[in-house]
Amino acid sequence: MQFRFDEDQLAMRDAVRAFCADRFDVATIATREGRPAEHATWAGLAELGVLGMLAGDSGVGAVEAAIVFEELGAHLASGPVLWSALAAPFVPGVADGSVRVTGVAVDAQSELAVVVEHADESDAVLVLRDDRLELCRRADFNTATQGSPLDPLTPVTVFASLPAGEVVAEGGEVVRVRRTGEVLGAAMLVGVAQGALDVARAYALEREQFGLPIGSFQAIKHLLADTYVRVELARTATYAAAAILSDPSAGDAGRAAGAAKLLAGEAGVANARTAVQVLGGMGFTWEMLPHYFLKRAFVLEQLFGTAANHAARIGELVGAEVATA
């Protein structure tokens, strides 16, 4: 079995990485605060095939999608990219960039105030319920209030309730969307974890104390080693889940996706916190990159189930197996 990326996958990764370095450069991230993704940037994502890659005729599998979303996570991409990609199979115009779709996952009890990311820049909202997928036009929503941003690049709007939407999927298709969201959310968290590690490593090699780079000190080495182990473990689990999503006969897709989201969520948050620590007194200030990675990790960790949710679900599955063994 081949566990390496092939030439086409590497070329896709490099193309998306170059695009992100140009359009989502973290060195100038402050210029993107509180602003929607630019039209030219969104058109570029469509031209690259990112927005339509989950459509049935794209020829792109879950592994390739995970490669792309890891890069988007590492560059802290702006806009509702993940929800738009999930909506592309159901909403005309998403793949070509003419329609932006955000989304929200709700359960049977979530009928009161609902917080929606990127609502003001989106044309529609995809509502993921337990048993169906609904599409609500942005114009159909009731009076809204502006919420406190979840991170500087993720504005939110609070709606008193959700309008009745058009049912665009039910049954197994809803499960597939949820699993795909878990895996691609995990991929973005892997990117965040890697980005935080890169920032901490670069600073540790540059910053000197007592005439030596602080990265030569054992305490810093241990911190960076732990961040490396976390991101590699999460990356392995995420790509394994993506492979199983492409070929369900290879394993339990639900358990694999949950494990990936669990490990990636822990890696994203812990690595970003470590980056804050390595940068020391200025690590927690608004001007430095670690706080962007930490806040984006908090946002993504909540998406499609928290680490605690997935740990509980996996524990139940394991417990059931033991009980029937």
Image (tube, rainbow, N blue to C red):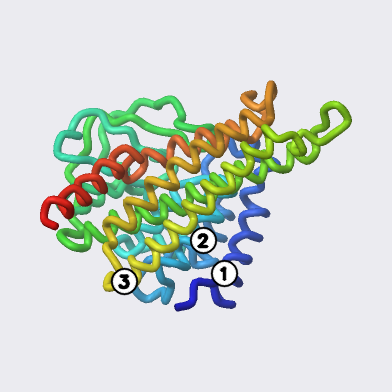
| Three-letter code, disc 2 | Val
- Numbered disc in front, either 1 or 3: 3
How far, Cα to Cα, is label 3 from label 2? 22 Å
Q: Position of residue 313 (x, y in %)?
A: 24, 45
Quadrant of image for the N terminus:
bottom left
Q: Are marks 1 and 3 in contact (CB under 8 Å)?
A: no
Q: Position of residue 82 (x, y in %)?
A: 42, 52
User: Is residue 73 shown above or below 276?
Assistant: below
- Pick the front one: 237 or 57: 237
> Farthest residue toward the front?
325
- Please name the residue shown 53% across and 60% down the image: 45
Dot 3 or dot 2: first in sequence order is 2
Left/right placement of residue 155 relative to residue 195 reads left
Dot 1 lies on which element? helix
| Three-letter code, disc 1 | Met
How far, Cα to Cα, is label 1 from label 2? 8 Å
Q: Are marks 1 and 2 in contact (CB under 8 Å)?
A: yes
* Total numbered labels: 3
Residue 250, numbered circle: 3
Dot 3 lies on which element? helix
Q: Position of residue 259 (x, y in %)?
A: 35, 51
User: Is residue 188 shown above or below 89?
Assistant: above
User: Which residue is disc 2 drawn over?
Assistant: 68
Dot 1 or dot 2: first in sequence order is 1
- Numbered disc in front, either 3 or 2: 3
User: Which residue is disc 1 drawn over?
Assistant: 12
Q: Position of residue 260 (x, y in %)?
A: 39, 52
| Three-letter code, disc 3 | Ala
How far, Cα to Cα, is label 1 from label 3? 25 Å
Q: Are marks 3 and 2 in contact (CB under 8 Å)?
A: no
Left/right placement of residue 198 relative to residue 258 reads right
> Farthest residue toward the top?
281
